[in-house]
Image (spheres, rainbow, N blue to C red):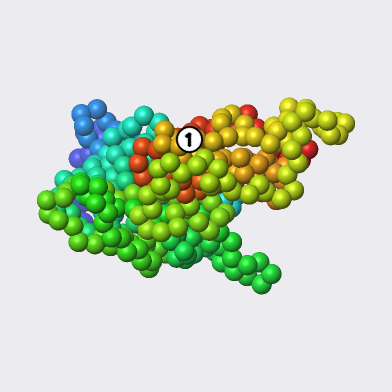
Amino acid sequence: MASLIATALMLAALGGPLRIAAADSAAPAPPPIPVPAPRPMPEDPTRVNPIGGARVSSTTPQGETAGMERPLTAQVERGATTVPMWAKDGIFAPTAHPNRQLAIHLPGEVTLGPAAWLPGGGAIYGSNDVDYQVIPYSGGGVDITVTRKTVFSASTIPFGVKMPAATHLRQGNNVVLVETDAAPGNPARVIGTFSIPAAADANQALVGVTPTLGPGFPPGQSNLTVDLGPTSIFAFPVTITVSYRASDAATTGAPAPNWAGMPAGTPAGAVVPPNPAGYVTDPSGAHRPDGIDPVTYAQRHSGHCQGGPDTYGSSDGRSANFVAACQTQQLCLASTPARTSVDSCNDRLLAHMSIQCVTVFGQTGDDYDACIRTASDEVAWAKANMAGGPE
């Protein structure tokens, strides 16, 4: 106690202050921290990539919301075949049913190189042992040619087909059909066709082909598998051709496997499909009702094809007749949009013209290629110049 008193007296003598701590009851309390106003988080937090090559990553999902916003774009009908840069993305093609499409996947597609583009939008996807050539046509059709370059390439070729909802594959008479599922009061309908592949070796000798249908991978995908017959090791390369059409007819035009067409010299009128029922031919327009557009009426009642010839003929006398296909398309356009779509009518036009090309000229060859190209050009003209709607 004496030491504390001595210390206090020393501080007083030195002039130091002597303070006694005490609570200040009058001091105001600090204000509360304001609560921030709630606001929605941005849909896409900004990404910062500093200079120097450093990469900033985030576990926050980018662009994911509750999913209740307006869609970026409305669904539209596919009117043409889409050939991708990478085969693994799938070859998308329409069907004869509006707003239904399918995707074709090539065997071993992840091992194939990028598309080597061809004139007209086609592509070749290559590998060491196998090449795949994809040729699209106006009207949603596509031809796929497989070239087995070596004996080491697989003789079993599974094409994957991603089907639209409520549809299935079925093997018909020398054709693979894409059909809708049957329902009470609504029987199964054909909305697409795959040809039974045609195969030949380097010596143009036919190679046997056995098609089978079954489930594919990933689950939900179907497989159209092609098993090739024996081939001489000295007869490579072997080519296999398969075609798809957005068709409503249960045929491709080939009555038998490896169909080579009608014999050379067959008269031009030997294969003439019947004209559709209900078609009215009035090229002069004498019976055109008042108020009907004369251009539209002329296109739909000329009795001929629009934008191209009525037939395609080869130098050996054979001829594919397109008149019935064109008249069917003209009737179809008059039923839009109540019963179908304009794109579907044009897709079926190519399919029906293709049937005539295959029946007369076979599934492959120069005459077949020229016939299909003529048909595709006519469909392209129709898509650009012929409107739908009732008369």
Question: Left or right of 76: which side holds 235?
Answer: left
Question: Left or right of 65: which side holds 61?
Answer: left
Image coords of residue 132 (percent x, y): 29, 45
Please tell me which residue lies in front, 55 or 355.
355
Q: Residue furthest bottom?
A: 184
Q: Which residue is mark 1?
A: 313
Please tell me which residue lies in front, 98 or 58.
98
Indicate the quadrant containing the N terminus: top left, top right, bottom left or bottom right. Answer: bottom left
Query: Which residue sits at x=45%, y=57%?
Result: 255
Query: Which residue sits at x=12%, y=54%?
Result: 233
Identity, as a three-letter code, of the amino acid under mark 1: Gly
Is the residue 390 above or below the residue 107 in the image?
A: above
Please tell me which residue lies in front, 223 or 28.
223
Image coords of residue 221 (percent x, y): 40, 62
Query: Which residue sits at x=40%, y=63%?
Result: 222
Indicate the quadrant containing the C terminus: top left, top right, bottom left or bottom right. Answer: top right
Query: Which residue sits at x=11%, y=51%?
Result: 234
Image coords of residue 86 (percent x, y): 31, 42
Q: Is residue 41 visible in the rendered structure shown here?
A: no
Is the residue 125 above or below the residue 339 in the image?
A: above
Image coords of residue 358 (percent x, y): 45, 47
Q: Is residue 49 visible in the rendered structure shown here?
A: yes
Is the residue 386 above or below the residue 57 in the image?
A: above
Question: Left or right of 225: which side holds 42?
Answer: right
Q: Residue furthest left?
A: 234
Check disc 1: other Cα within 10 Å, few if <14, some if 14-19, many if 20+.
Answer: some
Please tell me which residue lies in front, 37 or 210.
210
